[in-house]
Amino acid sequence: MKQKAVLAFSGGLDTSVVIKYLQEKHRMDVITVTVDVGEGSDQKKIAAKAKNLGVLRHYNIDAKKEFVDDFIHPSIKANALYQNKYCLATSLARPLIAQKVLEVAKKEKVDALAHGCTGKGNDQVRFDVTFGSGSNLPIIAPIRDLNLDRTTELEFANKHGIPIDSVSKKFSIDQNLWGRAIEGGDMEDPYNEPPDDAFIWVKTKNLPDKARYLEIEFEHGIPVAVDKKRLSPIKLIEYCNKVAGSCGVGIVDHIEDRVVGIKSREVYETPAALCLIEAHSDLEKMVHTKHQNKFKSIVDQEWTWLAYSGLWQDPLKRDLDKFIDQSQKVVTGTVKLKLYKGSFRVVGRKSKYSLYSHNIATYGKGSAFDQRKATGFVELWGLQTTEANKLSNKR
Ligand code: ARG
């Protein structure tokens, strides 16, 4: 009997090539799994493509709700922006996709797990570590194993009659609810400006002349309503992507350090993520003490690093999740963002847990803060600094 492999299938170039490769070189039957995390692609078309490529069975799993509840929401709580820029859209989706592949692998009693990641990226780490954390099955990664490049893959696709759409010819795209990563083409020269046609969520021309406000309401660190409308978690993200994108907000272009050491030029469209994380972190500053703020930013960075670098399953991440969840009890309130021609900023915030005291902060008459007490405080606060300088001046 033929051996079986289960493959995480996106319908794109890499994973289509992998199907043929597993069938021809490994002589295996292929079971494909497409996990919908909001790619916006036609799942029926992907299923048809898999069937045309001769797979034994195809699974389509809608995991959008899980993606938001168990991956995106924790990342908002952690203000997760890798290298202060990247909202982890791809990084968060991979462990979930890999988990779903594992579920199918168990059900189908397969002999191997497969993915279409290259050996140059972060995704291989996320897949391999999730696979390895949940099973002992061998992992086949043909693109990596054969050291394939895009041009060779396109030739292979042509030869085997694998249909490729025009966008994937130009760019390498990975897209889900939380963001859209655009790589390749002329953008591989980091000095080249990304062409306008790389973007489909964010408007780059003829932006509205009037500012648009977004009012985001959080409960325990999770966004629950926008513009006074309570929306389901998925709808809320879609709404923010749409509104912010229409104001030109959401493009990120930066140099990123990959786990394997490569520096890469990354371009993203992530309107909702940028707005929601900015609003969330602003609200935290209002409801947490300065000690909480200082320490949590260290935890956030570590959390983000673990999620980016494929260590979603590490026990440390679970420990940090507990800390972060505890810190979110008071992160309830509303933040007002102003969006205008590609820029955005927080222009207001309020919370029933606010630690801001007008009475103390005011420069006006009758403040409860007695300035005179500051003199002694400042003297002791700076004691070592002033003494150190006095002593070194003497020497
Ligand atoms: N650099 C990002 C990450 O590692 C995005 C990768 C996009 N992946 C892709 N196959 N185009 O998460």
Image (cartoon, rainbow, N blue to C red):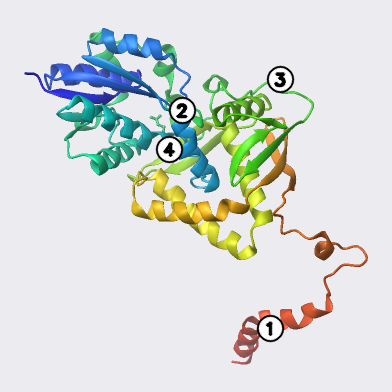
Disc 1 vs disc 3: which is toward the camera?
A: 1
Badge 4: few (under 14), some or many (20 or more) residues near its Cα, within 10 Å? many
The numbered mark, 1 or 3, whose residue comes first in the sequence reads 3
Nearer the observer: mark 2 or 1; the answer is 2
The residue shown at (84%, 75%) is 370
Q: Position of residue 368 (x, y in %)?
A: 85, 69
Looking at the image, tell me whether mark 3 or mark 4 is earlier in sequence order.
4
For label 4, the SS is helix
> Residue 41 in the image: x percent, y percent?
45, 17
**Which residue is disc 4 drawn over?**
92
Closer to the chain start, of discs 2 and 1, is 2
- Type of residue at label 1? Leu
Q: Nearer the viewer, mark 3 or mark 4?
A: 4
Which of the numbered marks, if any, corresponds to residue 380?
1
Rendered image quadrant of residue 389:
bottom right
Q: CA distance from mark 2 to mark 1?
A: 54 Å
Residue 206: mark: 3
Q: Earlier in the sequence, mark 2 or mark 4?
A: 2
Q: Is 375 displayed left or right of 364 in the figure?
A: left
**Nearer to the camera, 309 or 254:** 309
Tell me if residue 356 comes above or below residue 191 in the rendering.
Answer: below
Is residue 218 visible to the viewer in this orientation of the structure? yes
The quarter of the picture where residue 59 lies is top left
Sooner in the amino-acid sequence: mark 4 or mark 1: 4
Give the alpha-carbon distance from disc 1 to disc 3, as whole Å: 56 Å
